[in-house]
């Protein structure tokens, strides 16, 4: 089988569609229209003689053959990255590439200086390096590290993989917020006693990031009796809180804009909060074998 450039491109498009869970979702990621993406998948199916997925009005679903191709494509691209890394270590040309993965909305965190780090990394290599930044949830960041689809990750990691090394960078503080239209928000703005606010909290619907759990919420000082909704995206949580129907934790740096505009109010900030550790993660051993990784890690840690 001839593994030419067109074949590789079609595989990249196919994998992006799988990651995005559908052609419509992949359009913005690939910067391609739906018909172009569909043609690429069709071309891949014709080349392989396999039906890879069901796509259309009924949604997107991989066939069994498609699931196998996903696994093999990830292995293939991982081998490409291994090849690049080995050539990089020999000082060869065309190897200046660094892919950084981050959780969403770090940009409003003044403790995160990734922007300055990217500038310093680029300057260190005299601009002869291509840097990509992608946004994923913590689970996907670790998976992408293991698959060699990214080189470095910044996020909140609750699990630990033996093949990944984690370095603590700083603490992110989360406080509990709600809309002033929420019953709890009305009590807060009215200056109600703490006991009344805590009692009202128990029956509220709660929105939290997926790496929280009920224990985290209980450790914050109260028991939630209402509905619990989990999502990995801060913007999704913000929408839920702004609706007036939910209370939930948000990082202080992210929530501040909504507090300043009067759209959210902090709830008992002196007694209810949660600290999360922002960590820097990379594959074990690469800090010693790849100059790009060792330099990037040193710069990010120093800033």
Image (cartoon, rainbow, N blue to C red):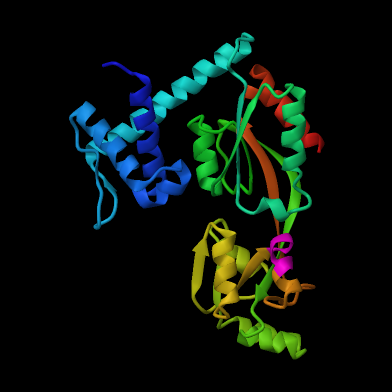
Q: Is residue 248 left or right of residue 24?
A: right
On screen, residue 98 above or below 209:
above
Q: Position of residue 150 (x, y in %)?
A: 55, 33
Q: Position of residue 232 (x, y in %)?
A: 53, 57
The percent coordinates of residue 281 (x first, y second) are 64, 37
Q: Quadrant of the N terminus?
A: top left
The residue nearer to you, when weighing 45 against 102, is 45
Q: Quadrant of residue 72?
A: top left
Q: Is residue 256 magenta?
A: yes
Q: Residue at x 29, y 16 (%)?
A: 2
Measuring from the top left, give residue 33's x and y in whole percent. Answer: 38, 46
Residue 232 lies left or right of residue 265; in this view the side is left
Q: Residue at x 58, y 62 (%)?
A: 235
* Residue 22 in sight in this render: no
- In the rendered view, tell whether residue 262 sits above or below residue 174: below
What residue range appears in magenta?
251-257
Depth check: give the residue in front, 207 or 55: 55
């Amino acid at each position: 089988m001839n593994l030419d450039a067109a074949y590789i491109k079609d595989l990249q498009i196919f994998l992006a569609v799988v990651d995005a869970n559908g052609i419509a979702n992949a359009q913005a990621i690939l910067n391609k229209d739906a018909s172009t993406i569909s043609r690429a998948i069709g071309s891949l199916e014709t080349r392989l003689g396999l039906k890879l997925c069901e796509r259309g009005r009924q949604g997107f679903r991989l066939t069994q053959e498609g699931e196998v191709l996903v696994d093999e494509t990830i292995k293939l691209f991982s081998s490409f990255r291994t090849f690049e890394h080995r050539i990089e270590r020999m000082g060869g040309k065309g190897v200046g590439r660094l892919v950084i993965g981050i959780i969403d909305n770090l940009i409003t965190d003044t403790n995160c200086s990734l922007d300055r780090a990217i500038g310093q990394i680029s300057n260190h290599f005299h601009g002869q390096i291509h840097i990509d930044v992608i946004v994923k949830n913590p689970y996907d960041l670790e998976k992408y590290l293991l698959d060699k689809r990214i080189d470095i990750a910044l996020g909140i990691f609750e699990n630990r993989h033996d093949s990944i090394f984690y370095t603590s960078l700083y603490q992110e503080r989360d406080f509990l917020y709600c809309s002033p239209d929420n019953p709890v928000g009305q009590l807060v703005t009215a200056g109600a006693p703490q006991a009344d606010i805590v009692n009202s909290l128990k029956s509220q619907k709660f929105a939290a990031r997926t790496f929280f759990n009920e224990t985290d919420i209980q450790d914050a000082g109260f028991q939630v009796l209402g509905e619990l909704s989990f999502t990995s995206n801060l913007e999704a949580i913000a929408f839920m809180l702004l609706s007036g129907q939910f209370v939930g934790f948000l990082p202080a740096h992210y929530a501040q804009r909504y507090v300043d505009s009067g759209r959210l109010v902090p709830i008992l900030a002196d007694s209810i909060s949660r600290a999360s550790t922002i960590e820097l993660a990379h594959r074990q051993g690469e800090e010693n074998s790849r100059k790009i990784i060792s330099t990037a890690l040193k710069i990010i840690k120093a800033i």
